[in-house]
Image (cartoon, rainbow, N blue to C red):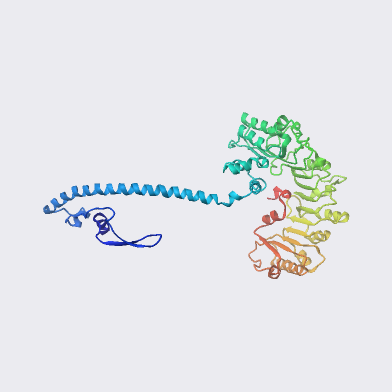
Amino acid sequence: MASYYFDLMYGSSNTESNSCPNCMTICESSDHSDLKLTPFTPTPVSRDILDSSDHSPLESQIPFLRDFIPRGRTRLAVLNENIALLKASLDKLVEERDALDVEICKHEGALSLLRHIPLEILALVFAFTLPPYQPDAASAPWTVSAVCARWRTTALSQPRLWASIDLKYDRRNLTNGFRLETQLRRSGEIPLHAEFSVADGLGDMNDEDIHLFRILGAHSGHWGTISLTGNSDTLWLIKGFCKDPFSLLRELTIEMLDHRSIHPESLDGFKDAPVLQRVVVNKLIWMEDIPVRFVLPWPQLLLYSGSNSWATHLHALHRAHNLVDCCLEIRGDIPTVPPSPRILLPRLRCLSLSNPRFLECLETPALRELYCEFAIPVLPFLRRLQSSSRELRKLVLWAARSCPPAPAADFTPIVDAVPTITELALVLSLPAAFAYDFYSRADLAPALECLSIGGHAAVPLGVHIQVMDGIERRWQGRLLKSVKLVLDEPEFPAAILTTPRAQGMKFATFPQNETLLRDVVPPEMWIESEN
């Protein structure tokens, strides 16, 4: 180390060979040729004295030490002067390098394919920043319009890009009146997708909150989809500020945080919506077993989903006779005797229920998909359905929670009752008798194309193996196309269905029953209490 500092201070008379880093040309240069410095004579004092404080210099060495100090300072001044000159040259080189780097980037940017994308394609790319592709689209139009003049022009020419309004009154909302009015103006006549929410426990809204909703309410005639989450004040704002009929409203979602404070007069705010087709009421929030009876244009609805009391759901379905999709979370007391006559829903195609006893209240001759618990009412409903039509194609059953489960002996009769099903999901424990029937009877679910089976620790390994053998037999018949399984048992064979899978059968595994259930149940048919 001492030798290194010695060479650094006093230099070396050796000549080095250097090569250009670009062309690798070899050139000879002296260490001091560029600096134009004369050799510097070192002091004859021992390095042990200079490098360590353990030794004192001899009297004869003191003159050499004193002589070195002014010579060294003079030399240091010369070095600093040369360093300053070199630094000035280096700064110019660095400045030129940085400027050239910027110019290269600009030239590369000029060749970027993004500059050659047609405006129509660019507008299509911008559309993917909106729902349903991006749930949170509040900042999307402002972000893309701030990139460059070309993007801004494209964004401003697309009213749909500005049609998603997000008002979350959680005191972190960055929207103000000017920004909201600007966005509404840029959206033109496009139907608006508005989300309006008040955080739980926030209390009364302040003047700025109400001002924002007043602005949005003035455009209620352009609402296409609206999602409201809040307390009773939310409904009163609807009645107070939305004077125009909801002439473009097609989808409505309402989640009420406090059912007890809702006044009946505030429940008819959306009765004047001539094209409303899809309604979701309290699907996520069902903390109170207090019925909320909204006044809606029920006869024109195609989808109804939500949580409410048994009687309130019946009241709605009596009027919603054109429903196509229905998902009901049933809360509160369940009557012992079903209503008579049953409610006829002639166009209903998809039905999902938290309590299968509600099946006793319905006649659904066109039903194609059923999602519910494996309970006693399922078998008589399916037999009644099959006697009037042969439309059912998908049946999803899971373990009963809301009412007593059906006996194990009902498994085979339930599947027998619907020979038209092409998709069957049994997310519960399979009995041995059903496994044997599935293996031995080719006439059990003869049209089956997709089979999903849940896992359970109490199911013997032999039952699983028998079901797998039944799957292989059906695969050989060329009807069964895909299988989904929950593999949560360590003793379950890892290498299963090897032949069908090698021959192209679609095969998927899931770690638990809930993940399988979420895969086979569409989001709009999902029952939140099953989570």
Tell me the quarter of the image containing the N terminus.
bottom left
Q: Quadrant of residue 49?
A: bottom left
- What x and y, as percent, mark residue 169? 62, 36
Q: Is residue 386 above or below residue 228?
A: below
Q: Is residue 164 left or right of residue 411?
A: left
Q: Is residue 457 visible?
A: no
Q: Is residue 192 visible?
A: yes
Q: Is residue 71 above or below residue 180?
A: below
Q: Which residue is drawn at the image coordinates 62% and 30% (left, top)?
A: 208
Query: Foreground: 238 or 492?
Result: 238
Q: Is residue 299 above or below residue 351?
A: above
Q: Which residue is drawn at the image coordinates 83% and 53% (left, top)?
A: 381
Q: Which residue lies furthest to the left in this view?
A: 60
Query: Foreground: 208 or 145?
Result: 145
- What x and y, as percent, mark residue 10? 23, 55
Query: Foreground: 312 or 499?
Result: 499
Q: Which residue is drawn at the image coordinates 29% and 54% (left, top)?
A: 34
- What x and y, as percent, mark residue 131? 67, 45
Q: Please tell me how many numbered marks the rendered image carries.
A: 0
Q: Is residue 65 above or below residue 442?
A: above
Q: In this view, does 131 lie to the left or right of 49?
A: right
- What x and y, as percent, mark residue 269? 75, 34
